């Protein structure tokens, strides 16, 4: 059975103090329905990707909460998998169509983070880590800093190499009207930004953001529909201490291998990828674990501009600006990645269009790599 | 969220980990901490390989900056983790200090 993303939309990402979760959800889902040229009554089920509504907002029961706001009384589910909640919600939506239960469903990814102070957000996000990591006072920048130091030691990756990831993603974000940041950066600016968790600095880190994204997924092909040809998930240990190899995220490798096999493609076929650059080191790891570059070779290639829009031949990575430039409302990110790929494959991405893009890959990670979700879309 | 029952249940895990030696395999300095740790920041968090090959993530204390290096030998000790909550039970846990 073939599945199609028939409609896709995001809100603007950023510090949206005027916007409520209800308003963001309405905007994303109704725009996606308009894009799909269909009515709310065609939605047979709603899948919501969200991580922090309970811990930060005191609101759970999000399936019914957002169904009510959208004027629906259909089956509705919240799917949680830390920062991979959006990708996991989509995976569950895919399964529901493949099972024959529904024919058209809506997937909403949403997060409202800037209503709360950074320490409270950091505490809530650590819910994605292990008990041992929480007792250590670790943070997610801290855990990725530990991974960064291993990579630097093993492969000679430098802090400047990592900074180049943020520079590229801000350049892409400057071309994306919905991105949180529109300022470009230099390596020097990243290097001089304040230290968050050594060796990671402020501008190595994705921001705290608000936003929502939605897609309509259907078994019915439409004229503008984009085929979703693979959806795969893998998991790993919650904590870094239980991992055998700290130079890779094994879940990324495992999920991508599954997805390539399901879609009948190899990494060489991917024209455009939206990957989970929650920290600059995470994009370096993703490039290697997805098979785009051999281990230890990705950082220098990114710094040379090999994955920047307009590069001509190699896969372009994070044309939306990624998590770093576009923003990272955690539950929304995995769905926003699909929206960007749909725009790219339809050829309507404007100044950040990857020319001739036919195959796109989305890579969404939860925690420090305990969940990885891969989706592959084809024109 | 802290809970006296959870703290009590965790005691046996602490006993099994204390007084063990190992070496640092990676480290960071957390400068923007979670809410419960604001009065301790900045502080190092280290990933240690213990003698038995197991890895542990914990905070490092009683250190000089020069002790923050891969290969540095450390020993695990019991320390207070954060402030007690309204129930008054003090949360203890494992931290590491340099082995001299």
Image (tube, coloured by chain):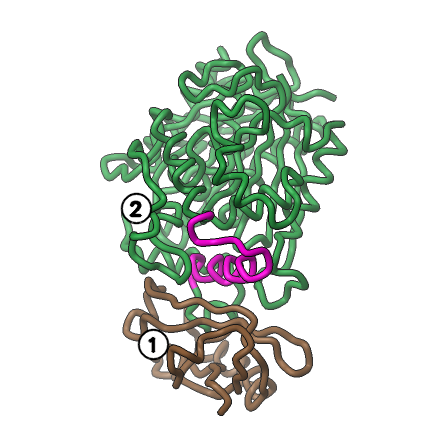
Chain colours: A green, B brown
Label 1: which secondary element: loop
| Quadrant for the N terminus of chain A in the image | top right
**Residue ID for mark 2:** A189
* Left or right: residue A186 compared with residue A309: left
Residue in the foreground of this view, choosing between A251 and B83: A251
Location of mark 1 (residue): B85
Question: In this rendering, is residue B85 above or below A346?
Answer: below
x, y (%) of residue A310?
Answer: 48, 22
Label 2 and label 1 in one chain: no
Taking the spot 66% from the left edge, 34% from the top edge, the residue there is A231
Which residue does the image show at 51% across and 61% down from the upper left? A149
Residue A133's tag is none
Chain for disc number 1: B
Q: Residue A105 location, x and y as percent?
A: 57, 25
Magenta run includes residue A158: yes
The kind of secondary structure element at disc 2 is helix
Label 2, label 1: how many angstroms apart (C-alpha)? 41 Å
* Frontmost residue, A127 versus B27: B27
Q: Quadrant of the C terminus of chain A?
A: top right
Instruction: Name the residue located 54 percent from the left edge and 39 percent from the top edge.
Output: A301
- In the rendered structure, the residue with mark 2 lies on which chain? A
Packing grade of label 2 (10 A; few <14, some 14-19, many >=20) is: few
Instruction: Confirm whether residue B57 shows in the render.
Output: no
Please identify, in this view, whether the residue under mark 2 or under mark 1 is nearer the observer.
2
Quadrant of the rendered structure where residue B48 is?
bottom right
| Bounds of the magenta segment | A139-161
């Amino acid at each position: 059975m073939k599945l199609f993303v028939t409609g896709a939309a995001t809100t603007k990402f950023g510090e949206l103090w005027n916007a409520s979760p209800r308003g963001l959800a309405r905007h994303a889902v109704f725009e996606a329905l308009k894009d799909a040229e269909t009515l709310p009554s065609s939605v047979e089920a709603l899948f919501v990707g969200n991580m922090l509504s309970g811990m930060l907002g005191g609101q759970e029961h999000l399936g019914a909460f957002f169904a009510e706001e959208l004027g629906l009384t259909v089956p509705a589910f919240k799917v949680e998998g830390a920062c991979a909640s959006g990708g996991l919600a989509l995976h569950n939506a895919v399964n529901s169509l493949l099972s024959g239960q529904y024919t058209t469903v809506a997937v909403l990814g949403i997060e409202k983070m800037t209503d709360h102070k950074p320490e409270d957000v950091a505490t809530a996000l650590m819910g994605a880590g292990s008990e041992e990591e929480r007792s250590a006072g670790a943070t997610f920048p801290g855990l990725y800093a530990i991974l960064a130091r291993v990579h630097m030691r093993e492969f000679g990756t430098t802090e400047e190499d990592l900074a180049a990831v943020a520079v590229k993603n801000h350049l892409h974000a400057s071309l994306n009207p919905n991105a949180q940041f529109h300022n470009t950066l230099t390596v020097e600016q990243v290097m001089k930004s304040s230290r968050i968790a050594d060796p990671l600095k402020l501008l190595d880190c994705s921001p705290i953001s608000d936003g929502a994204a939605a897609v309509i997924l259907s078994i019915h092909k439409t004229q503008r529909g984009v085929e979703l040809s693979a959806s795969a998930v893998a998991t790993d240990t919650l904590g870094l201490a239980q991992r055998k190899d700290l130079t890779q995220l094994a879940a990324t490798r495992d999920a991508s291998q599954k997805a390539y096999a399901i879609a009948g493609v190899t990494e060489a076929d991917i024209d455009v990828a939206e990957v989970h650059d929650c920290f600059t080191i995470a994009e370096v790891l993703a490039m290697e674990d997805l098979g785009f570059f051999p281990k230890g070779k990705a950082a220098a290639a990114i710094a040379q501009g090999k994955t920047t829009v307009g590069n001509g031949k190699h896969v372009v990575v994070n044309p939306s600006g990624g998590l770093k430039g576009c923003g990272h409302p955690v539950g929304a990110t995995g769905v926003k990645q699909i929206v960007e790929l749909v725009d790219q494959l339809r050829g309507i991405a404007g100044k950040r269009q990857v020319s001739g893009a036919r195959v796109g890959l989305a890579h969404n990670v939860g925690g420090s790599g305990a969940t990885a979700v891969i989706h592959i879309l084809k024109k | 969220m802290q809970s006296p029952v959870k703290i009590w249940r965790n005691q046996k895990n602490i006993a099994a980990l204390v007084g063990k030696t190992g070496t640092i395999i990676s480290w960071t300095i957390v400068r923007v901490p979670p809410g419960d740790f604001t009065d301790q920041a900045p502080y190092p968090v280290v990933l240690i390989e213990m003698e038995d090959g197991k890895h542990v993530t914990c905070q490092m204390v009683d250190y000089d900056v020069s002790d923050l290096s891969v290969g540095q030998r450390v020993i695990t000790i019991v320390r207070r983790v954060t402030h007690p909550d309204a129930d008054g039970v003090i949360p203890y846990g494992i931290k590491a200090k340099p082995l001299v």
